Structures are given as C-alpha cells and as structure tokens.
Amino acid sequence: MTKSKKKRTVQAASKWVTTDEEERALRRERAAEEPMRVRPLSSSRAELFQDYAVSRTDVPDALPYTVELRSLGEPVNSCTCPDFRKNFLGTCKHVERVLASVRRPKRNEPAVSPKAELFMTREPYVPLLRIGAGVPSDAARKLAKQVDTQGRLRRTDAAGLAALIGTCEAVAGRVSQEVRDFLTELETREQLERVKAAFREQIIEAEGAAPFLKLPLYPYQIDGMLHLAFTGRAMLADEMGLGKTVQAVAAAAVMREIMGVKRVLVVAPASLKAEWEEQVRTFTALPQEVLFGARHERLLRYRHTPAFFLIANYEQVVRDWREINAVFQPELVILDEAQRIKNWRTRTAQNLKRLEARFAFVLTGTPLENRIDEVYSLTEFIDPSLFGSLFRFNRRFYRFGADGKMAGLKNLGELHEAVGRIMLRRRKDDVEEQLPERVDNTYFVEMTPEQTVRYKEYEETVARLCHVAKQRPLRPEEMERLQNALACMRMCCDSCYILDKEVRDAPKLDELEKVLDDLWAADPQRKVLVFSEWVRMLELAAERLKKRKIGFALHVGKLPQQMRRKEIVRFKENADCRVFLSSESGGVGLNLQTASVVVNLDLPWNPAKLEQRIARSWRKHQKNRVNVINLVSQDTIEHRMLGTLKFKQGLADAVLDARGDAAAFEQENARGAFMARLAEVMDTALQVPVAGGQKRVLEIPADQRLGALLQSENPGVGLCLARYGGDADQVQAVLAVGRPEAADALRGQVEKTHGVALPPDRVVVVTPETRALLLRLAEMGFITLRQDAAKRIFDTGAGEPPPSPDLVRRCGRAREILDVAKRQMRMAGVLAEGCFGDEADKAAREAVCRAAGTLILFAADVPADKVTYPMTEAWVTAVKADAEVDREQVAVLQTAHFGLAAEPKTFIEKAQGFVGYCEDVLEKRQMGGGRIIHFNKS
C-alpha cells in the first residue's frame, strides 16, 4: 500500500502540470518520511494553536523553521520556509509535520484558533484578520471596524496596518511575524515613493546631473536609475546599447546616499569585469575592486576589501557564495548579463539564487530568447513570490495536451503584466530621439563551386535525417549527427577554410573588402566591427587585412583576458586601428560605439545574439549613423534562417513588450508551427539521395591521426576518449582528462584530424580529480561507466596531462635562478652575523632581484633563456601586474629593485621570506596537475 502511494506521488510530481491536491500530497509524504523534530515555542505547552519550531534531525546544526498553527483543517497556517512562501498552497512539509504531531482536540474544543489571528494570505499577498470564537464581543467589535467582511484592511496603507496590529495586540491576539515584516516593507516603500518623487524632480531640473555622479544621465536613464533604486529588487531589461551598466551604477550610488547601502556585489561575465571597472570610474568616485586570484586570496578580499563595488565573475561567485553571504554580506547584488541564470536547472542559477542581500538588480537585454520559463528563473531571483512555484507557473502560462505534454502557451498578456511589476524595459525605438539612426542591409553572396559541393554533401546528410524524423523520433546519436551536419553547412557558407585549411576561397571576404572600400571612400575614419561565429573565418579575414596593411584588433575567446582588454583599448584609441574582428566573446556587454559599422559574416541561430552584436556599436553616445550589414550566402541555410530569426524575435516581443499578436503564439498548434519553421531551415523538401556513392578511403584512420597528434603536440591532456557514430570517422563527442583550458586546443586538433568542427559542449576536458570522483561513484554503484561507449585515443598511463616542454624548461631555469638566490641569501646571513649591515643588505637585495626571475618566468611572456640578471623595470611591472603574486612580496621586490630605504635587519628577514615564496611558486608549478616535473639539476 505504501509503495503504490509513493509511486503515484512521484509520478504526479514529475509531470509538467500537477494539481494542488497532488502537490499537497507530495508534501504530506515528505513530512512523513523525513526525520524532523517539532518543538512548541509557547511556555504553555498544552496550548494547541501556537508557534512551533521544526528542524531536521539528520543534519547537524540545522536551523529550525517556525510554523504558526491556526487551524487543523483549513490552509491558513504559516511557515518561514522558502517553499511555503512561494507555493501558494497554504501548507508545506513542516506544516504537515506539525499537523501530524500535535494532539487531537478535546471534546467540544474548536479545530481553529479561538484568538484574533492577523496573518498574510498567499494569493493575493495581503494581511487577513480572523476573529476567533474566544475573542470578547467588545474587542471583536473594535477589530471588525478596521476590516471588511472578508477580514481585509479597510485602509491599505502602512498607517492602517499599524493601527490594526496595535488593536490586535491590545486584545491579546496573535500577529504573525510575516505581517510585521510586511508593515516594515510597506512603510519603507511609502517613504521611498515620497523621496523618489522629490529626487526625480531635482535631477530632471538639473538636466540629469547629480552631485554623486561625474556625468549627467539621459532622461530615460534617470527613469531606469530610479526604477532600480526605489524598487529595491528589480529588473532592467533595456535593449542592448541603452546603458544598463550606467543606470545600475547610478542607482547603487543613489542607494548609498539615501538608504545607507555600504556593500555592493557586482556579478558579471569575466570578460566584462574591466568594462564595469571603467564605467564605475567614469561615472562615480566610489571605491571599487575587481576580484582576482585563487580562492584563498578571494576569501581574504571578502573580509578586508574597503570597496563599495566588489566586481566578481559568475564562476567565482558560484564557488564562493557561502563565504560571500557569511563574510562580505552584500546589501545589494547586481547581476549583469543575467541570462546566465535563465536556465533554472543549472548550478550557476541555483547557487546565485542562494545569495543573501536585501536589494538586487537583474540586468539583461534578452530576458527571453527561446522559452518563457527563462523569465520565471530571472524573476525568481528577484521575487520568488511573484509567480510562486514552477508548477504553478507552468499551469498558468503553458497549454498542455491530453498526454500531459506542453502543447502551447496561454495568458501571455497576464505574464507581461506580472513581469512589469518588477521589470522596466525600453527598446531603442522607444527612445529613438535620443539615439542615432540605424540602417540594416543584407547582402547576398554566391558560393564558389567548391563551397557548393561540400555544402551539398552535408545538406544530403541533413535531408536523410529529416526524412527519418518524419517517420519516427531521431535517436540521440542521429540528433548529434544532424546538429553536426547543420553546423558544417553553416561553416561552408562562410568558407571551406573553416573545415579544410587547404581551401582558402571566401566570397564573403571578397564582399567584405568591397564594403570596406566603399565605406572608406566616403569617410576614411569610420571604424568597423566584424563578427563571425567561427574563429578560423576571423583568422582568414585577419590575413587579408594584413596584406592590405589595414590596422585591426582581434577579440576571440582563446586570447587571455588581459590581451583582449588591450585589443579593445587599441581599437578605441588608435585611429589607425579601423577594424575589430570578434567572435561571440565580443557580442555581449562591450561598449564599442567608436565604430559605426557592424558587419555580420554569418548569422547566429538566436536573434538576441544578433542584436547583442549590433548593440556593441548602436548604443548611447553614438553620434553617427550606424550601418548594419549582414552577409548571407544565397539559396542556403543562412538564407532560410532569416525567417526563423524573425519568429523567435516575435515570441520575445509578445511576452516582454506586449508587441505583435500574442494569440499567434497561444494557438494549439504553436509547437507545430515552430517545428515547421525549423523544417524550413533544414529544408526537408530536398530529395533524399540514393545510397551507393563511393566513400573516400583514408590511409590512416582519424582516431590514429588524433592520437599521434596528441603524442607530438599535447595541449594538456593525459587521457582522451572519443565516441563515434556508424561511420568509423564520424566523431560525435570527445572526453579528456587534463587541464580544462586545453579544451579549445583539443577541439582544434579534432577538427584537424577528423574534418568536423564539433560544438564546444561536445569536447569536454575534466580534471583528474573529477575523473577520480566519477570512478569512485561508479565503484559505489551510484553511476554506471560504459567501457564500450568510447574509443581510447590517447593515454599517458597516469590519466594526467604531461607537462608542456615549455613549462619543463621554465621550471628548470627557475631552479637555476633560485639556487643562486639562495646562495646570496646565505651570504647575507653570514654578513649580518658579522655586523656587516650594509654589505648584508646589498646581498639580500641582489638575492631578491635574482629570485624574482622565477616570477618573471611564470608572469611574463618572455622566453625562458631570456630571463637574466639584472632584471629590467618592465619585468618588475609585469610581476606587479600579475594578480596571482602576493602584494606584500611585490613591495619587497620594489624595495630591492628601486633601492628604497629599509632597515637592514628587517629587510633581510623579508628578503628571506621572498626567496621562500618564490620557491613555493616553483613547487606549485612543478606539481601542476598533480604530476611532478623532473629535470636534470646538473
């Protein structure tokens, strides 16, 4: 009986749509199964309707939740747990556990509280008064005067609620803590509305200027600043280019002035941290710090930073959220490019939502790209009670078929209205009078015969698979082949060079050169952004620009962050640098309004990504007309993608901006219409070719070529496995053990040996620690590892990456340098003991300058054999710029190199510590990845 009940509940909970009763049953089941302790909080333990503390008994130091019990049968009880606050069921597992644990009422004892009870209802979220049977009649009359017949406030302002709380307490009623919190929030909100009105009037009169801002704001930016600052927890979803960063910085400054906010955590993609630093410096004089370094260094900064703005990237916060809550304790959290948390299933989204802060800003230009539950995830970070639990959101806004599967959308107007309570969104055409003109053009380009032949080969593969998909669902391996073939079709549209370096023809680049000639014939100073999804296409473009002696900057993900930043600065400040070549890494967050032309060498699948590219130029402070030029290969998948991009943009318009026809997306066959558009892109009308063509036979199998390449040019992996499809050379995915940063290089080697450019998520490099964990979990029976699922391509035997030859050389050179430095320190010690203070000081300074060569070897891009003594000032600067080097040790090096004054005895001690620090650095490098690097000390 118990087993069947459990099975039914789990099945109900796993469906897309459930009923309230199924959800309540699930919570009753959890209450019965999980080990919990219930403890009454009133001094009168015999009192039934009181507050109870409920805590887990299987979790050490588990914090209790408080349950307020008012009824044994009605859903009017309360709990302080997160689930209760957003499920709108009036119950949770803690309430159900209390109901199961308390004594049953005695004969003639009521099943509801006899007191006056003031608590919050869930839907709508308002205070409600219930006058129990035990309340004296005169007290009941006083209470009744302040509420309507349903028990709700007649005066809904803070003063009205405060008066009701006072009356309720005077007649010995119980006031829920949630009501008191609501009163505080209401009073704060009313006060802020008054301040907001006065503040807005002042700043508009000052034409956007404020004493705490260095530069004035546009009128629409004033509204955005006030929306964020005075809503407190809010979303700013302006289209790209309208200055969301500036509005958030200004709003934080307002909150510092008016609300006393002292600590702000900015969470942004790593590539945008420098951009935030620049914007904060440009618009305010507030202290800031960009978070760098290893975990132990970050933990120190959380405790000791004096900054108002602490700027971190998502990966750091995902790992450090506990310490951030406990130590840094931000009062305001700003998420930039918050689409990183739109998938509520990801670890990033889950950990970011554990951040504890009174205020929160969510900044995104694309709150919806593909699915409406992306909006749900973003709003959950701001206000979990806005839509409640996910099951309630699904029930309200998705249409489900008889089989329980999603069949369409509904109530999009209501969704737009609900999101509008916390979201402010302006599109460029809303504030067009403050923005420069933008002109979009699409140029169609014919492919070469070689491109066409290769394109048709992949198109035939797609046609076959689409034909199969009409008969039955594709298997996972078939879907992977379809995705790979589609990607290769798109690559061929750009240039065969992406797949085969022997073929260098690229009609799109021919067209690009014509476009540049036309642009510069009219205005030689115009700067141009050129985007492509494929790095090899950008490399080919770079070669052509070099031949024509045209200055350009390159911004791709494989470049180090500091190098990318230098490229951005060079493009902005150097008049001769007129072209900015960028992959998708430059499509988000960068301000490149010095350019007034955007050329897309290819089209992304997602319209939001296309707009992100364009917004790098078409944004505030742009004084010139912006030309957007899309280069599209004629009669190809790119040509057909144009309609699909418009469809996806239409869905975002309906939900976010209430534009277009929402009903068109709420039809029963909306899913079918979407699939039809995908079919148009895949071009399933193609005839399926008849099998029988000759396959090209390779002399050496692709897996052996890859193994040989890893043996000679290993990017940092010790074990490499590959999964193949039916075709022996049709690689589907690659898994390696080694250094995760080797993934890009490994992907390039797979492309070189197999002729297929796998998507980045199909080439994964895990650390040896992760592999060990997986093996341990397999031994314990939690997971199953299929030994026959992949082919072993390369294996060092240890499963760990071999050290690179360059690293071995650098470690050997570092050991030579340290041996000399240690001898110098021993000499300094002997001189100091003999009371030769000046000579000892000189020897210690020389030892420091010599030992610093170890840091140069790992901090600067200098050949190992070029690091010699004496060191140059540029090398000192390089050590100082390396965020991994301890700041105290940098000070010791500067004292030694520049001859700064220091007490000899103290400095010798610091010099000894510096040499030891350098030796620690070397040991860490030698132990990189867990493998000791051995070298000949002779």
Image: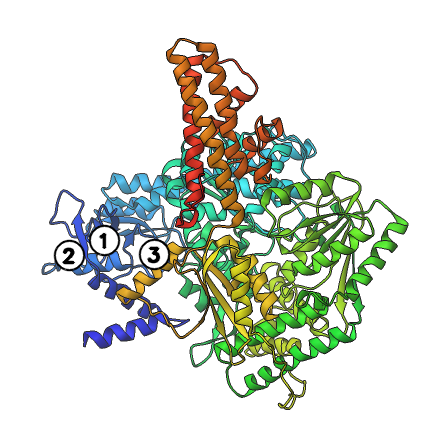
Q: Is residue 25 above or below residue 545?
A: below
- Earlier in the chain: of badge 3 and badge 2, it is 3
Q: Residues within 10 Å of mark 3 (few under 14, many from 20)?
A: some
Query: At label 3, which amino acid type do we have?
Result: Asp
Indicate the secondary structure of the residue bearing disc 2: loop
Distance in Å between CA atoms under marks 3 and 1: 17 Å
Residue drawn 56% across and 39% down? 864
Q: Position of residue 768 (x, y in %)?
A: 39, 55
Q: Which mark is residue 83?
A: 3
- Kind of element beneath mark 1: loop
Which residue in the structure is indicated by mark 1?
69
Give the position of the C terminus as an image quadrant.
top left
Along the polypeptide, which appears first: circle 3 or circle 1? 1
Camera-nearest residue between 531 and 31: 531
Amino acid type indicated by mark 1: Leu
- Which of the marked residues, 2 or 1, is nearer the chain's N terminus? 1
* Res 729 quadrant in image: bottom right
Q: Nearer the viewer, residue 817 or 30?
A: 817
- Give coordinates of residue 100: x percent, y percent: 17, 61
Identify the residue at image location x=29%, y=52%: 79
